[in-house]
Structures are given as C-alpha cells and as structure tokens.
Image (cartoon, coloured by chain):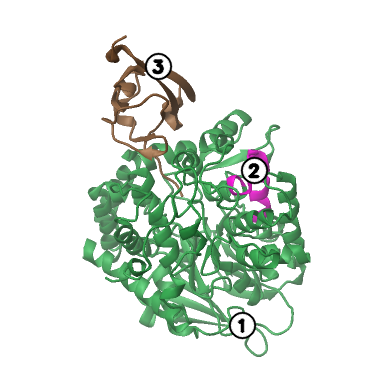
Amino acid sequence: MDKILRIDMGAKGGPKMTESPLGEYAGLGGRAMTSSIISSEVPPLCHALGQDNKLVIAPGLLTGSAAVMSGRLSIGCKSPLTGTIKESNSGGQAGIAMARYGYAAIVLEGNPEGSDLYKIVINNKGVSIQVDNSLKMLTNYDLIEKMKGEFGEKIACISIGPAGEMKMGAASIAVTDMELRPSRHAGRGGVGAVMGSKGVKVIVFDTTGLKMRQPKEPEKFREANKKFTEGLKSHPVTGKGLPAYGTSVLTNILNEAGGYPTRNFKTGAFEGASAISGETYADLETKRGGLATHGCHTGCVIQCSGTYVDKNGKFISKQPEYETVWAHGGNCGISDPDAIARIDFLDDTYGLDTIEMGVAIGVAMDAGVIQFGDAEGAIRLVNEVGKGTPLGRILGSGAEVTGKAFGVERIPVVKHQSMPAYDPRAVQGMGVTYATSTMGADHTAGYAVTANILKVGGFVDPLKPDGQIELSRNLQIATAAIDSTGMCLFIAFAVLDQPETFQALIDLLNSYYGLSLTADDVSALGKKILTIERNFNMRAGFTAQHDRLPAYFSKMPLPPHNVTFQVKDEDLDKVFNF
Amino acid sequence: MSVSSAKIKIFLKLFASLRLDRFDTAYREYDSGTSVAGVIRIEGLPEKEVTLMLVNGRHVECDHTLADGDTLALFPPLGGG
C-alpha cells in the first residue's frame, strides 16, 4: 500500500485520475487515513454534498495481509447527516482487494456536472472510469448481478443503491462479501449520499491473481498471527458465543438488564425479545438449512455472521445483526424474525443504514404514521424509501428529519445521528459515548457495553454515572486505534481481557512494518486520531453544547429501573482531557 | 416451620449455551438463603461458564442471596454489537 488514487469527478472534460505516493499520509491506515485526509483537505464548513467534500476509502494497516480478522475498510467524508467528520467502517472483500492493488486510499473528489452515473473498474490493466447510465437506480443486489455478468465472479465491489443516488442522510455504501452479496455496509452517517454526489455507482475490483501483502519480518509475523488466532479462539466470546449465536446474542441480556430500547426508547424491556434473540435466529437458521456460523471476509476466525433463509429454505438475507434486529424489531415493537430479515434485505439492497432506518420508522410510529408492531407497514415504509416517494424521502433523511416532519419530541439522536441499541439511561457509559463521540451517536466509537453489561474488561455499574467518563474515554481511544489497523472491532473482547492477545496484535503491526511500537504508542495513535477529528468538528461549528444527549433522557425515567441519564455536563466535557 | 426450611420461589432464566439440554425458563423452589452460586450448583450448571448473573435486571455476584419472587437470569460470556 504505497500509493493514493485520486479521482476528480468534477474535472473539466470528465473524470481525471492521478496516482501519487503517500507523502504526508505515510504510515496511516483505515480511520487514521480517512480522518487525516478529510481534516487536512476538506473545508469543514463545506456542504457535505458539494464539490469540496471528498470521499476517502482506506483499508487498514494490515488489510490484505495474512493477519486474521484484518479485512475491514474505512470510508470517510464530512457527513451529510451529522455535519461532523465521519468514518464508517465495513467488512466484506473489497478492502482486501484494494490493499493488494497497493492503494492505501482511494479519494473521490469534486462533483460531476450533469446527471451521468459512473462505474470505476480496477484490474491488472489499470483503472478505468466509465459512464454507465444503465445502472441508474439499480438496487445493490441487481447491480452486483449485472457486474457479475459483465466481469465474472472474481470481483469485489463497493456500491450504492437508490438511496445513495437520491443522496439520503441514511444512505450506506455496500461492500460485497465472500458470496458476492452486497451485504456488508459502511452504514452510518450518509456516506452513500456522498458517493452519490460524486456520481459514482460502483467500484469494481477484479480479484484475479491478486497476491497477499507480505510482512517485513515473516517469521515474527507468522508467530504473532498464530498467537493472535489462539487468543481469539480461546476467549469465550470470540471463540464460542459470537460464532454460535451471532451478534444478536446480545438481545436477551440487554433486555434482561432493562437497557433494550423499546418502542422508540420508551421502555428498556421488550416482551417480544425472545422471539428475535440470537438464540432464536441461530435455531431457525439451523432448522431451516441456513447457516448460523459464517464470516464476512476471508481470514475471519470469529465467524459471527450467517445466512438466514425462510421456512422453505430460500435466502432472505444474511443473518441480520443485533443492531438491525433491534432497530427494526424491539424499537418498532416488532417480534417477527422473518419480517426483520426481509427489512434487512431491503435496507441492504436500497443501500440504507439499518440503524438510522429502524429509528426513523420508530419515530414515525410514535407519530402515528403506522402503529408499533406493524411489520407489514414497516416493510411498506422501507419500500417507500427505496422508491423515493415524498414520505420515503423524509424517512430516508433519518430519524431527526422524520421527527421534525411529524412533530415528535422524543427523537433519540446526537449530532443528528440516531442512537443504536442501548438506552443511555440504563447503559450510562454508552450515553457518554453517544454524547461525546466525534461521529454523533455511535455505539462502535466506544463500546461501554463491555464493562457496563458484559463484564469484559472489568465492571462499571450501568445504572450509575460513576466511572463512565473514564470508561468511555479509554474505549474511544482504543477504538480509534483499532479502526486504523483493518482489524474487526470484535477482537476487542479478547484483547481487553487477555494481555497476551493485545501483545500479539502489536507484534503483528511491528513485524509487518518492521516497527517497535508499544502499547503506549497504540494509545497515542488513538488520541491523535480523536484530536484530529475533534479539531475538524470544532472548525465545522461544533461546541461542548453539542456533546449532549437530548434533554428528555435526563428528564423522563426509563422503566423498568426508572432511571434517567445521570452523567453531569461538566463531566462530559472532560472525556477528551488526555 | 423454621426459617431454614422455608422455601423461596425463583423464576430462573437460562440463555445461550446454558440452555442446551436444559430449559429456557422455569419456576424453581430453593431453600431460603440460597445464593446464586447455590442455584448454579443445584441445577448442575457449569460453574466456570456462568459469568453473567442478573437478579431482577441488576448484575450480582455469585454470593448474592436470593429472595422469594426474584427473577434470576444466567448467561455465559457474551459479546457482539
């Protein structure tokens, strides 16, 4: 990964590409790369859909190597949803292909005039940028079928669906998985809308003959990879729980702990949780002939995904993730696992963030657009989004716009982005992360559920404010660093509990690049990234007053524990004191 | 009837791998004064695999003494997100 590909989509006479060495961005990967480029090159006050914004796609430092779990890529821009800097992260196969072509980043710049839609094809002959208006408004699944017909099965794709073309705030960017399904998504923050504004429908990587990236110190690297793999396999979460039940294994414990946001964050427990739990999904997948244990990219040893089929064995969607099942399930009062999987497929194919869509529909239900629990109604609403009807445009703009359009007070967003599947009143560490993250409400930014609920990396009482600031701070720092390596964030469960597995991760980086990083250096990297992002947001007009939850979380107690969010504003302002 | 022979009724919930070859939920009776560790032993659950214990929705430790009418939820190590 020694070069950056820049494509100026707004160049006179049509898109113009340049390849350059890394220069000032040398040594960066993933989120460190995307946030550094955005912060240095994008005017913070620009319109996110305007020509001055850039879309940066960057594999992690280890992506494309033999390191297990390292297939993630980061997509960065100024977010049209939040107005902040954005890094949205995805699994799938494209990061690996991109890294093996040597690209540390692909940067889409400028906006084309006119309404032509482009596809970018990268193969062993080079890069070509072609107008292909036959792709207009294709869904992701139809688009990938077309690409398979054109280029064969040895490809990996990064694409947008109709939502991205319509530049919706909830638009995602899809990445194909090992089965060439566009089922993995850089979901959050409307990154798909930015790709749409650049006029790019799809980037196709021909994967024929691509070679694995080679480490500087192969022996040490092999040894570190072995220890790292052993650490992941021996930890009960990454070695047993996640492979067997997938991420939805969280449904029951969040529900038991009273932190499962139900019917637009009105209560913390859902009577229908068991029907949509990880246990139920895994059971249905096994009985119906789907697959309960599967990875999203080559080299995954955790295998938290799966394939979900209907009672006749016909594919509905990949195994929906916990956040998706919650957003379209409990948050909407829906307990039908098949209906939720169908919505997951619709979100994937239209190119929508499942969290933003589920929360937007929950807000619409609160307004009485349809009733809580109306699964068919929810499917209809997602189809309206895909078609771009006026109601669909409102919903596709996200939870906040939906709430404003329908006069709803309870809109669970921070910095205009909807909260995920943990009520901040009953999981107060998550409340700190939602409030202060550079990304808007984002669970992955500092996953305090670990110590609040799962007793991973210690225990901090989820119902009290004590200890939450430090917990969120440390997790936000660690996450920013992990997001730069290309590693799946789920390695954190093992890394937090097992010092030798953390050391193996550092050894992987050191032996790959011939470095001598320590744990302190990793922490310093995380702090540096957060500082860059905070600085961009400050220049974009964000202040301490934006690092807050909506007021109702401090006023309206959440049953069953009847708690409000107790962390003080002045303490929230201390999260980034490092 | 002496205090020690009194019984407490507990709603016991098992999750994930703890359910396998057992049950999802059941009402059980134990001697008064039974702790969470006691339930794990009486029910023959694999002690090392029970790492998350919630009584009435709040995290507790093994030595927590149960009261009549409590809901006890037991989980193996979990993660996701």
User: Residue shown at 67%/49% (left/top)?
Assistant: A343
Residue A125 position within the rendered picture, expressed as x and y whole percent measured from the top left: 57, 71
**Chain identifier matching the green colour in the rendered picture:** A
Residue topped by disc 1:
A50
Question: Regarding mark 1 in the picture, which secondary structure is present there?
Answer: loop
Q: Chain of mark 3?
A: B
- Mark 2 or mark 1, which is nearer the start of the sequence? 1
User: In this rendering, do the residues under marks 1 and 2 share a single chain?
Assistant: yes
The disc label shown at residue A81, or none: none
Q: Chain of mark 1?
A: A
Q: Amino acid at mark 3?
A: Glu
Residue A358 position within the rendered picture, expressed as x and y whole percent measured from the top left: 62, 54
Residue topped by disc 2:
A334
Specify few, some or many for label 1: CA neighbours under 10 Å numbering under 14, 14-19, or 20 or more. Answer: some
Which is the main secondary structure of the residues drawn in magenta? helix
Q: Chain of mark 2?
A: A
User: Residue shown at 47%/64% (left/top)?
Assistant: A549
Can residue A203 be seen in this snapshot? no
Whole-angstrom CA distance, mark 2 to mark 3, is 34 Å
Question: Relative to A531, is A561 above or below?
Answer: above
- In depth, the one of A283 and A368 nearer the eye is A368
Question: Regarding mark 3 in the picture, which secondary structure is present there?
Answer: strand
**Chain identifier matching the brown colour in the rendered picture:** B
- In depth, the one of A174 and A366 nearer the eye is A366
Q: Amino acid at mark 1?
A: Gly
Residue A337 on the magenta span: yes
Residue A116 position within the rendered picture, expressed as x and y whole percent measured from the top left: 73, 77
Residue topped by disc 3:
B29
Question: Regarding mark 2 in the picture, which secondary structure is present there?
Answer: loop
Q: Between label 1 and label 3, give the one nearer the viewer.
A: 3
Residue range in magenta is A329-348
